[in-house]
Amino acid sequence: MRSAPPVIWREVHWQRPFPIDAAMELLQRIATEPSLGAVRLEARASAAGIRWLIGLEKPQIGIGTSMVKQLTGARLTAPVGPRIAVVSAGRVRLRHPALSLTTERIGAITRSVLAALAQANRDGDKLVVQIVLGARRGPHLVPEGVEDPRRAWWQLLWGSAQAPTEVRSSLKQRASQHGFRVEMRIGAAAATPERRRSLLSSLFGALRVAEAAGTRLHLDGLAPASVNAARRPGSYRLALSVPELLPLLGWPLGDGPLPGLPAEHPRLLPALSSLKDGGRAFATTTAPGVVQSVGIPIQDAAFHTLLLGPTGSGKSTAMLSLIVADMVAGRPVLVVDPKADLVRDVLERVPEHRRRDVVVIDPLSDQPIGINVLAGANRSPELVADSLMAALKGIFDNWGVRSEDVLGSALLTLARTPGANLLWLPTLLTDSTFRRKITSRIDDPLGVSAFWARYDALSPQQQAVEIGPAMNKLRSFLIRPGMRAVLGQSESRFDLSELFTKKKIVLISLNKGLLGPEFARLLGSLVVGSLWPIILGRSALPQEKRTIASLYIDEVQDYLALPASGDLADALAQSRSLGAAWHLAHQYRDQLPAAMRSAIDTNARSKIVFGLEQADAAALAKTTRELSAEDFQLLPAHHVYVNLRQQGQQTGWFSAVTQPPPPVVSDAIEIRRQSAERYGRPVSEVDAALRRDLHLDHQTDTAPHAPSTEPVGRRKRP
């Protein structure tokens, strides 16, 4: 005797809401496809929740799973866990099997069955509804004089008993629909026999909610092996139409809350394709089924990444995972952190082979590392000046044409002066002797030389009026010792271009709680603005030598500014080919100016979105058919919806949860100390150098005199 083909099981992850009409259509299609053979449908409950399986014999598995996907949008995977054996089982039969079960309370029966399944919530509990679909039954007519299926044997002695009207109606209801010969089994496993009996009794009671007038379900004993092996029965006890069968399956039908199931929102949305993390994993998928690592391979990271979510949602944790992966891989990394917490977390996770690469720029340090935003080989002075102007313009209120003219000319002058730094700016504008030493070395009669000629022709009072707004703001920033120490080093031991050329890990700690938000914003904006000329300079390198650097900016609205002639969308597009992968984080969309928001929306191809407020949730929901505003609003902390760039394609939105922070492997205090020792200078030393460079150790002579031939700025160390 030939043995039956093996049964192949697939776990079904139904999409919710699961419309009753869609489920009905699926069963009707199975009923009209006899080539599928016997179909096993299971709902299995345990303390971990309720799961659904479909079992088909091997030759039919392909067509069956395809049918489920196409008609319902469900996802099918290999079972996440084994089909745990039951210890007790029963077989459901129907008294007066010719009569129909109710088809009017599908929602109520569904909730009743799910509620019973949900009672399997203790360790060791298992509860199963198993339905085997056998021969198909098509719609057919009921004869006019059909006999009453409820008649007793003794009524046969008196001749046939015709069915009354209500019985004929029940018979017609079933006969008018497609259906199946059905074997229905239930099974349980639990720590004690009493617990097993309780679970089976509750589940059978829930199934009895489907009884209609004249019908009654009964439960007969059954060997558990029949359920465990999902065997075809020798004979099928039931004949059910599709509407009768549907609510008995334990499927999550309809919308709204259902017993034993997680809330419908936020949706657990699967990734539609296999994911590649490229060694830069930051999350894992949360949709039922195969758990995948979620990451952004570095080549795809060059298409830039947006992280959106309020404070406490988990943005820093996601960035930390990406940063650590970049450090481990030996890549250049820059982090702009307005709270200093992320910098601390990074310093605790620096791999041993990268610790000499760390550069911590912290204006609160006793020995800060300087950034000369005016200096750098192979950088256009005009682009440097424009970048700094954009940063200052983003900070200063009441910015007018006069301020822009004065500061633009002054910054361009200093950018053309070897050894200059930003702290020279006030002295350049106010000290005529110092100004002549600088401007006498610049020959630009149609440009800045003409500006200075006009400026020097003004009286001191007129000059004061012209530079007053700019000077008031500049002085308030530059009187801070920490700011002076970072921005006032003409010959810093670290050049920002080393981020790219020497693959440094540059951590900019802007503790705005101690620095003040305006001061933190100025320093961060100036440093980020100084990156742009360096990035453009990489165009001189062959493509294969442009190592991708990962640039992380939290609170991006405060620190990302471009020259007035620039466009952020173009800048992000150019950065892609020049090896700069921007990771931009902020709390809510209205923080960004409209132009910046549009540029980031368009060019940040990887989006990591945490739980949002109502307005942002509504805006994001408009970009996808799969998710609603409610989904985005109800995400718990550290849970995300992501749409990533991978292998040149978008993944589409799916749900994930960020990984916990990587383990601590390094001493943050010691790495800070080594960084300061290697690249920093004491504040007192920087101030002394500034006094010498700016001739502030004596009373400045403002009377006109011949230009000095004395070198300007500090001499290089031998």
Image (cartoon, rainbow, N blue to C red):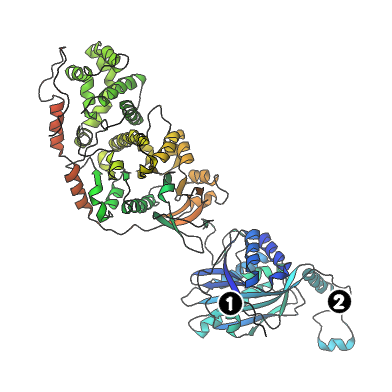
Kindly state the secondary structure of the residue where label 1 is placed. Answer: helix
Q: Nearer the viewer, residue 577 or 533?
A: 577
- Residue 205, x across and y down, in percent: 62, 76
Q: What residue does disc 1 label?
A: 202
Amino acid type at mark 1: Ser
Q: Nearer the viewer, residue 377 or 456?
A: 377
Instruction: Examine the image and state in which quarter residue 336 appears.
Output: top left
Q: What residue does disc 2 label?
A: 146
Instruction: Examine the image and state in which quarter residue 264 appears.
Output: bottom right
Callout 2 environment at 10 Å: few (<14), some (14 to 19), or many (20+)?
Answer: some
- Residue 213, x across and y down, in percent: 74, 74
C-beta proximity under 8 Å, tags 1 and 2: no
> Is residue 257 left or right of 706 when viewed as pictured?
right
Q: Is residue 680 above or below residue 320?
A: above
Q: Who's the residue at 61% across and 77% down the image?
A: 6
Give me the C-alpha separation between circle 1 and circle 2.
36 Å
